Image (spheres, rainbow, N blue to C red):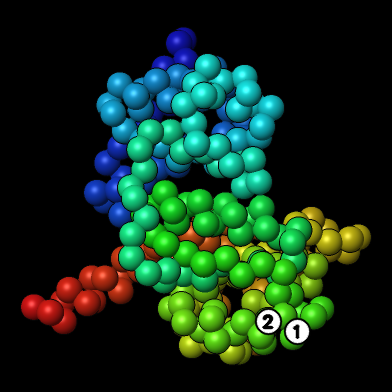
Amino acid sequence: MSIAEEFTLDFARSERIGLEEAIFCAGKSPEQIDAILEAARARGAPLLLTRLDPEKRDRLNAAAQLDYCPVSRTAVFGDAPRITGPARVAVVAAGTSDVPVAREALRVLGYAGRAASLFADVGVAGLWRLTSRIEEIRAHPVVIVAAGMDAALPSVVGGLVAGAVIAVPTSVGYGVAAGGRAALEAVLASCAPGITVVNIDNGYGAACAALRLLHAAGRLAEERER
């Protein structure tokens, strides 16, 4: 069996749901990723790659053709849409250790052509850091919050902003933080109503949730104009 028989790219996904397929690189070999990129090149299609570790990226034949971010472990192959318009999404990181997850969300939004704003190191251990920037955060209709440890920040933000809040529990923390499980259960049990929760460290999923909300808002605006 050839490597080309090990994958089938979904080039029509954006037409169905408004989100392009992303290539999750963890668990894929450099040879498989190179074959996927070659298939995309043959169609003239860009691709977003996630969870691409630096060591694996260096082993790719197409490494020089990637726009690579080692912090978020994401890469863009080909020409992504230009980022246009005002920032509609705030990406909030509780601590500096949560920035890689936040950066993943930012990169996914950027790949979709959506501007976003980063607010880093505004966790509840120094609540003044959040309150000093809360008006800036409120200006965004969608807020992604990445937080580990006890993941208190999404609940606090959920009680302070009127827009949609998407919580991303992260695997940051000692002992009973249990690789993000404590953070996940905390945001699932949040008393702030209406918070959307994605999986641990899933900045990609949070960005996709934000994009779905923006697409829905766009469709509603179009219907009102008719």
Residue behind mark 2: 130
Can you give x and y, in whole percent of width and height, for residue 56 in the image? Answer: 64, 26
Farthest residue to the right: give it. 175
Amino acid type at image mark 2: Leu
Can you give x and y, in whole percent of width and height, for residue 8 in the image? Answer: 38, 28
Instruction: Tell me if 31 is positioned left or right of 38 in this view.
Output: right
Mark 1 element type: helix
Can you give x and y, in whole percent of width and height, for residue 16 in the image? Answer: 26, 51
Can you give x and y, in whole percent of width and height, for residue 78 in the image? Answer: 38, 33
Amino acid type at image mark 1: Leu
Q: Is residue 216 visible?
A: yes
Q: Are marks 2 and 1 in contact (CB under 8 Å)?
A: yes
Q: Quadrant of residue 145?
A: bottom right
Q: Is residue 186 visible?
A: no
Mark 2 element type: helix
Residue behind mark 1: 127
Above-or-below relation of 115 to 19: below
Q: Residue at x 80, y 67 (%)?
A: 149
Q: Nearer the viewer, residue 50 or 195?
A: 50
Farthest residue to the top: give it. 1
Instruction: Tell me if 85 is positioned left or right of 163 in this view.
Output: left
